[in-house]
Amino acid sequence: MDEQWGYVGAKSRQRWLFYAYDRIRRTVVAHVFGERTLAMLERLPGLLSAFEVVVWMTDDWPLYESRLKGELHDKVIGHYLNIKHYQ
């Protein structure tokens, strides 16, 4: 799971894309757009109920940890930066 930031018309109108990526299929399997809130984040796992999610991989945003408490969860901080740096 990850998120990306953007805006509509002005930077004060922020919108976030939350998405779930299946690393085996190499595709985005679910996404939601909205504000960067727990309520918005809670919508994504609901869209994934048809999938058997074994491990959640996220960055260090604290709401991920609070939402995924009790589930197998690992943080992948800096992985994207390492990939970008060594290309």
Image (cartoon, rainbow, N blue to C red):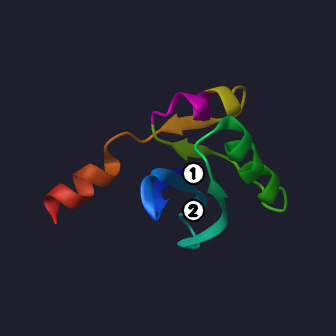
How packed mark 1 is, by other alpha carbons closer than 10 Å (few <14, some 14-19, many 20 or more), is: some
Point out the tag, 2 or 1, that comes first from the N-terminus. 1
Q: Amino acid at mark 2?
A: Tyr
Find the residue positioned furthest to the left: 86
**Residue 56 vs residue 50: left or right?**
left
Residue plotted at (42% across, 42% down): 76
- Residue 31 position, x and y percent, is 65, 63
Residue plotted at (31% across, 43% down): 78
**Residue 67 vs residue 60: left or right?**
right
In the depicted view, which residue is nearer to us: 62 or 36?
Answer: 36
Q: Main secondary structure of the magenta part?
A: helix
Callout 1: SS:
loop
In the depicted view, which residue is nearer to us: 87 or 17?
Answer: 17
Residue plotted at (47% across, 56% down): 4
Judging by the rendered image, the residue that carries numbered circle 2 is 21
- Asked if 16 appears above or below 26 in the picture, the reply is above
- Asked if 58 appears above or below 67 in the picture, the reply is below
- Residue 74 position, x and y percent, is 52, 36
**Residue 3 vs residue 87: left or right?**
right
Q: CA distance from mark 2 to mark 1?
A: 6 Å
Report the span colored magenta. Answer: 60-65
Query: Which numbered dot is residue 1?
Result: 1
Callout 2: SS:
strand
Q: State if disc 1 and disc 2 touch (CB < 8 Å).
A: yes
- Residue 22 position, x and y percent, is 59, 64
How packed mark 2 is, by other alpha carbons closer than 10 Å (few <14, some 14-19, many 20 or more), is: some
Q: Amino acid at mark 1?
A: Met
